[in-house]
Amino acid sequence: MEGQNEIPSEMDTNDAAMLLDKITAEPEPKKGPAKDPATGKFVKQKPDEPKEEESEEEAEEPAEEVEEEPTEEEKAEEKRKLKVKLDGMEQDVDEEEVVKGYLRQSDYTRKTQELAEQRKRFEAEEVAALREEREYYKQNVERLMSVLTELDPDREPDWAAEADRLPPDEFSAKYKAYKSRQDAKAKLQAEHARMRELEEQETTRERATRLAKEMEALELAIPEMKDAEKGKVLREDLTAYAKSLGFSDDDIGNIEDHRALVILNESRLWRESQKRRPTVEAKVEKAIAGLKPAGAPAKPKAKETELLRTKLKSGGSVDDAAALLDKLMG
């Protein structure tokens, strides 16, 4: 049969015995799925677990560290938002950006303050030294102009008469010297004019800076000056009041110290309160006369009432009148 072991034509006794054992040997049964004796169904078998055989090198290798993913709380903290008002609108901005912006602003403020301090030192030291040097230079220019004016009077010589009187060489030398001095004098005059113009420009800048500071101080002392409409009305009132006291337009225009304007405004307010005083006193007296006792009201203290009356009559304010009313109606 096909598939059977073929028998060789020639063999000895040993070969025949080995062949016989090989033919008669039972093949190993193949393992199939096991059946459950109760149900007769096949039972699923677990696969054979591989033998845990590790080499020494594998055993020595450390286990890889697994990075843990951030939790939801950690993610929320990383993306924390803060409400910031930008251009009048509230916006949510990362906390980190807010901190960076604050640091940038702090650094800008610090540098601005340092620059202001440097500018003050420069104005106090360098500008003062520059002014002294400029003044010395200006004085030298004026001295040279005075010397040249003494050498050459205002009247120019009669060159025709000088030509007849002097030899040609002397006349030519005298004429050249005169013209050279006149040129130098013209240059000195131009330089002197330039120095005066620089001084005037510097004076104008200093005055503008001083007026800006005085205006800032005035707005702090009288807040109404910051408002365009209220400030305009207040300036008109101050001008009218100053003129009523005898100030001229030039006098008012030359006021640069904010303290003078503050005093002028306080004087104006006091004068207006004095004008209103008779009206207030009349109202107080009318209110007192019209008071009628109802039941048994608590009587005000006579001494305090008398003091308030005396204070009001001797130049009290509207607040004093209100206090007297409260005391009487108490």
Image (spheres, rainbow, N blue to C red):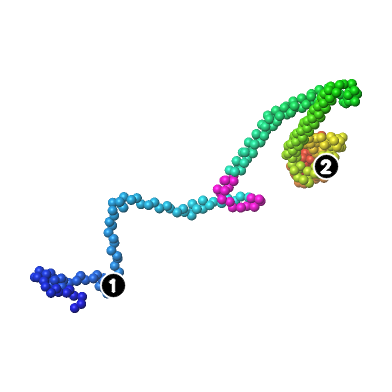
The residue positioned farthest toward the bottom in the image shown: 1
Whole-percent x and y of residue 218?
75, 38
Over which residues does the magenta segment extend?
86-102
Q: Is residue 273 visible in the rendered structure shown here?
A: no
The answer to which of 237 and 34 lies nearer the viewer is 34
Nearest the viewer among 33 and 7 is: 7
Image mark for residue 236: 2
Q: Which mark is residue 182?
A: none
Using the image, determine if residue 252 lies above or below residue 138.
below
Tag 2 secondary structure: helix
Marking on residue 42? 1
Residue 206 position in % (x across, y down)? 75, 34
Q: Nearer the viewer, mark 1 or mark 2?
A: 1
Residue 10, placed above or below residue 274: below
Q: Amino acid at mark 2?
A: Glu
Residue 257 point in image, percent of width and height = 77, 34
The residue positioned 77% from the left and 45% from the top of the image is 228
x 33%, y 51%: residue: 61
